[in-house]
Image (cartoon, rainbow, N blue to C red):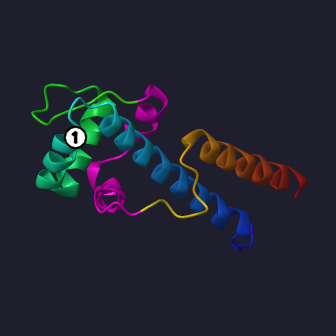
Amino acid sequence: MSGIKSPIDDALLAAVYDRLCSMIYSALNSAHENSDEPKRFRKDWNEIGAYGLAEALMASAAGDYSSGVETFWMDPWIAQHLCKLGADQIVTIVQYWLERQPLDLRVSDDPLEEDAKVQRLRNLRAGLNRGS
């Protein structure tokens, strides 16, 4: 191996990050929209800040309802991806959501669409590696 990095590797890293952004926005939007009191939810979340909300997101993903933070239901598929991370790894994305910054135009609101992009790039990379 020559140590040359493929542009596909860079694209894959970007796609994985985009999928993470989409998953976090989806989970937070869903919890917010399904709340009985969405305005209170957003107010509370702004008060605990990005790191506190990231911790709540991680506790929700892990199903840890005894953590002392306000947890909420999330799609199990998203939860399985987020369980592998820590609050410090997602806090920046959570901050963007709290600031009401929209997802980048290239990122779909649907995390499954972003996952399909990741899978296509992984398949392309695997195909190129088999051909080497």
Can residue 84 be seen? no
Asked which quadrant contains residue 12, the reply is bottom right
The spot of residue 102 in percent (x, y) is 44, 61
Mark 1 residue crowding within 10 angstroms, few (<14) / some (14–19) / many (20+)? many
Q: What residue do we see at 38% from left, 36% from top? A: 30
Judge by depth and name the residue closer to the eye, 60 or 122.
60
The spot of residue 60 in percent (x, y) is 28, 32
Taking 36 as reference, is 82 left or right? right
When the figure is inspected, residue 30 is found, relative to residue 87, above or below; the finding is above
Q: What residue do we see at 32% from left, 35% from top? A: 31
In which quadrant is the C terminus drawn?
A: bottom right
In which quadrant is the N terminus drawn?
A: bottom right
Asked which quadrant contains residue 94, the reply is bottom left
Magenta stretch, residue numbers: 75-101
When the figure is inspected, residue 37 is found, relative to residue 115, above or below; the finding is above
The spot of residue 10 in percent (x, y) is 64, 67
Taking 10 as reference, is 25 left or right? left
Magenta region's main secondary structure? helix
Judge by depth and name the residue closer to the eye, 60 or 96.
96
**Mark 1: amino acid:** Ala
Dot 1 corresponds to which residue?
56
Q: What residue do we see at 22% from left, 32% from top? A: 71
Taking 16 as reference, is 128 left or right? right
Q: What residue do we see at 61% from left, 62% from top? A: 106
Secondary structure, mark 1, is helix
Judge by depth and name the residue closer to the eye, 111 or 84.
111
Judge by depth and name the residue closer to the eye, 54 or 27.
27
Taking 39 as reference, is 83 left or right? right
When the figure is inspected, residue 33 is found, relative to residue 11, above or below; the finding is above
The spot of residue 81 in percent (x, y) is 46, 38
